[in-house]
Every structure is written in structure tokens, then in C-alpha cells.
Image (cartoon, rainbow, N blue to C red):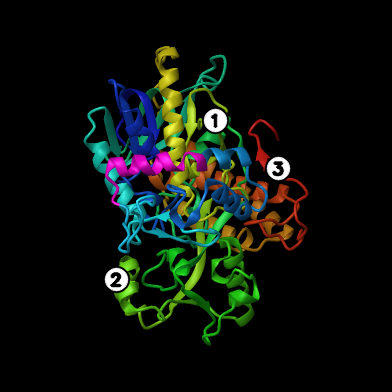
Amino acid sequence: MSKNTKIHECDVLVIGSGAAGLSLAISLAKDDRKIIVLSKAQIGAGSTNYAQGGIAAVYNTEDDHDSVAEHVRDTLIAGAGICDESAVEFTLKNAHDSIAWLIEQGVPFDEKEEAYTKEQSPYHLHREGGHSHRRIFHAADHTGHTIQETLNKVALANPNIEILTNYHAIDLITTRKLGIAGNRVLGAYVYNNNDDCVETIKAKFTALCTGGASKVYQYTCNPEVSSGDGIAMAWRAGCRVANMEFNQFHPTTLYNQNDRNFLLTEALRGEGALLKRPNGTRFMPDYDERGELAPRDIVARAIDHEMKKLGVDCMFLDISHKSPEFITKHFPTIYERCLKIGLDITKQPIPIVPAAHFTCGGVMVDNHGRTDIDNLYAIGEVSYTGLHGANRLASNSLLECVVYGHAAAKDIIARLPLVSNIPDLPTWDESQVTNADEEVIIQHNWHELRLTMWDYVGIVRTDKRLERALHRINLLKDEVQEFYSNFRVSKNLLELRNLLQVAELIVKCSMNRKNSVGLHYNIDHLEAPTDKKPTILSPFEK
């Protein structure tokens, strides 16, 4: 690694280039404000790009006779009583304006083919599990990709936004770390993967928009970049985290050794797809009266239970009873993807397994997206707003990104004139480290961590499994910290360091919750919670 003392300066550093990061950056990039967007890979390589289903919002109350109150009710039910009701109401009341903003940016949501009244909106809406009405705006079955592409074009065309690709944030720079009074963020150290060096970014405000941490599990439908970087960095800087025990496992991902990690949208079940055993019989009615439209935690546990009970590798999702024209029109991406592996979903059921999908907890923020540290924000899956509770209602996640991106932008714009210039920051010191001699250590620890989390901290947990997981994680953390202290940083080392920190937080939150609710299911504590309190961890409490 060559020595590099390059220092970037900006008004706002946005770490992450998905829906959360770009919604924030685009909303800020006016009046000569300089915004730097940091992208770990190419722009838009995060989870937004892979979101198939859509974005939930009550845009017009004439659509399916829906209301914001009904959307709030569905969200609270899915969250199993652990949501922050004020955060739910704040988010869903701002849903209409967020959809309108996306449409204004150019997102081409699907429109109705059938006739509609002038009081109704022109958009075709899906219904998904846990929703009582059709309220899911979508672009076929590639909504996230369409939103991502649209926001990419807008951001790239804005001269006030500088996008740095293949840059990996290492750690936040704060006044506390520099021995200055208070705890205010001043920027970040970042690894430039293009030039194999560490650079410094000075910023008046910093926003973590880094997504979730599902890569901590052996099986996930998330992209490679979902390694919990923002959660780990915020924790090390002094932020509290909450509800890390609630990891959502998407019930239906494609089971195929040659095409792993491909999610099969909730909208399939919303449009009538049925879950079946290998012998072709349905099983969801045995677990919940809502059948295939039960919330994700219930569906995932049912699939997991059936697989273990029957000793099989997968269950099946069948939509072949619908017409081929209907399937290929509404689910073209899934149809083409399955066809490439020799599976015609218009005629055959799809083999499926659950996989880690969404981190419902994260860095604690308020309704402006502010964290515990002055001038530091967290937006999207990296954050804990209180919206999701013990389980996320389908298609509320993209909405959260846009709503809180706009809320944070308004707050930052109001506060920017009050922020003084950033003092000189020390450059990254690598004088005491050398090049790593055995990268195999990183790879071995990486695989051990993800398998440990899958086996011991997965869909079904026990006290003993959690204790074993924490013991292994602590040993791995010690090894990796020694490695980090003695060798120059690399992308894999930085991700493993962050994943180990997040894994510890997940296990500790799981151990602190002495009940089973939503996505946290511990067979040693099957009783329901007696209160609606989140599980909160502070880095200053041992």
C-alpha cells in the first residue's frame, strides 16, 4: 500500500449510495453545498438495487379504500407490539410526499391497465404479506433497481455531488477520539480500494447510509456489501444500538446451487403463489389463518419447521396455476432468472429456502435521523427508527429510506450555517504495520463467523446456542483485532472486523431479550413480552 495523505473536504459526507444515501444527497445538493457520496463498490451496489417487491404508501385513500391509519395498524401488527408508534405514524404520514418525490425524479411506477375513476391514482398497486390493502407501488418485479437507476442518473447529473466509488469507510473521526471536548463527528478515514491507500474526508455533517448486516449469516439474499459497516463504525464512535436481535429472514429465496442468494418477492404470494411441501400439499394454513400472507417471521419459521420435520433441503413456491401471460407480465425478472436454470415457473413450482434478509435494529436515531453523536446521522437499514419493531412489514424499508433521507436533509440544511469549520485532522498512520503475510486467516475466520451465526443465532435460538456463539465471536474478535493492529487494511479485513462487531451486538441483544417475539424466537423463553421496550445497548456500559 502506497502512502497517501489526500484530504477531501465537504459540507456533508454521505456513506452509502442506495435509496437512503441518494435521497439525502439529492435533497441536499443545492445552493452550492458540496456533497460527497461514498460507495463501497460501484454506485448503487447495495440492497436497494435488488429490492423486487416495491415501496408501501397510502398515496390516495380512494385506492382500495385504504388509509394511513390502516397502514399504521398493519405495521404495528407486523412489529408484534415492539414498534415505536410515533415513528410509525411519522413515517407513514410522510409516505405520500415521498412517493410524489420519487415520481418527480422520474421513477416510472407501473400504471393500471383497467379503468379507474378521477378520484383514484393511475398506479397499479400490489398487496403483500401483512398488508390489509393493495398499497405497494412497483415497477414490475424490479422496483428497487428502477428506483436506484433513476436516482443514479439524478445524482450523477448534479455538479454539487461528488461520488467516490470503490471507497470503504474505515472509522468515523470524532472530537472524543482526538481528545477534544464533546463528541462531534468531523469526518472519516476511508480506504481507497482503487489506489490501495487510506484517505481522510473532512465533513461538517456525516450520514451513515450503509445498509444492514445480513452478510453476517451463511445464507443471505443480500449483496456482498451488506456487512454492517455503519452499525460497527457508529458503535465504535459511541452510538447506542437497539433491537439487533431482530434479523428478518426472507421466507422465499431460490434454492439452487448454481444461483444462490436470489430473492423471490413477497408479491408472488400477494398475487396468489402457494407454499407447498415436496408432495405438493400446502402447509401454511396449518400455521396461520392468513396462510401465505402471514408476516415474514411466521412464514419463515413454518418453512424452517417443515424442512426439519421432513428432513428435506427445501420447500416449494407454486404460482403455476396462474396464466403464463399474468406471470410473465408481473414477474419478468423472476421468470427469466429461473428459466436460465431450466425452471419454467409457469409450469413448475420453485424450490425455496429462507435466508437472512433485513436488519430491523441498528443505530438509534430520532425522527430527523440524528444519532447520539453531534452532526452524525443514520438513514435506512443501518438505523433503528422504531418503525419496524420486532418484524418489518413488507415494502416499508424503501419508504423509510426516502422519508428519513428527506427529514435528515431538512435538519442538516437548517443547521449548516451554525457549524464552524472543521479543524485540521491527523492523517492515517500506518508506520507501525506491514503487509499481511497470510490472508487465509481472514477467509477462515470469515467462514467460521457466518456458519456460527447461522447455526446458533438463526431462525430458532436457545440460550446455549447464544452462549456458544458469543464465545466463538469473542475468540475471533481477538484474532482479527491483533491482525488489524499489525497489518495494513484491506477490504476483506475491514468487512470481517465490522461483521464480528455486529455479530457480537446481535448475540448480546438476543441474550438480553428473555422472551420470544417477532423475529426473535428462543425456545427457552417462549413467553410473550410484557412491555414494548426495545433492547438497547450502549458502548459505555459494560
Contact, CB < 8 Å: mark 3 with mark 2? no
Contact, CB < 8 Å: mark 3 with mark 1? no
Q: Position of residue 364 (x, y in %)?
A: 58, 36
Q: Which mark is residue 170?
A: none
Name the residue carrying label 1: 371
Crowding at label 3, few (<14), some or many (≥20) Cα neighbours within 10 Å? some
Crowding at label 1, few (<14), some or many (≥20) Cα neighbours within 10 Å? many
Q: Which mark is residue 533?
A: 3
> The disc labelled 3 sits on which kind of residue?
Lys
Crowding at label 2, few (<14), some or many (≥20) Cα neighbours within 10 Å? some
- Where, quadrant-wise, is the C terminus in this rendering? top right
Foreground of the two, 207 or 507: 207
Q: Position of residue 83 (x, y in %)?
A: 63, 45
> The disc labelled 2 sits on which kind of residue?
Glu
User: Residue at (41%, 30%) from the top-left corner?
Assistant: 189
Query: Residue 53 vs residue 155: left or right?
Result: right
Q: Is residue 198 visible?
A: no
Secondary structure of residue under mark 3: loop
Q: Position of residue 251 (x, y in %)?
A: 52, 66
Query: Residue 404 vs residue 29: left or right?
Result: right
Sooner in the amino-acid sequence: mark 1 or mark 2: 2
Q: Is residue 273 visible?
A: yes
Secondary structure of residue under mark 2: helix
Name the residue carrying label 2: 336
Depth check, mark 3 against mark 1: the one in front is 3
Q: Is residue 97 magenta?
A: yes
Give the magenta range: 92-108
> The disc labelled 1 sits on which kind of residue?
Thr
User: Residue at (65%, 34%) from the top-left corner?
Assistant: 538
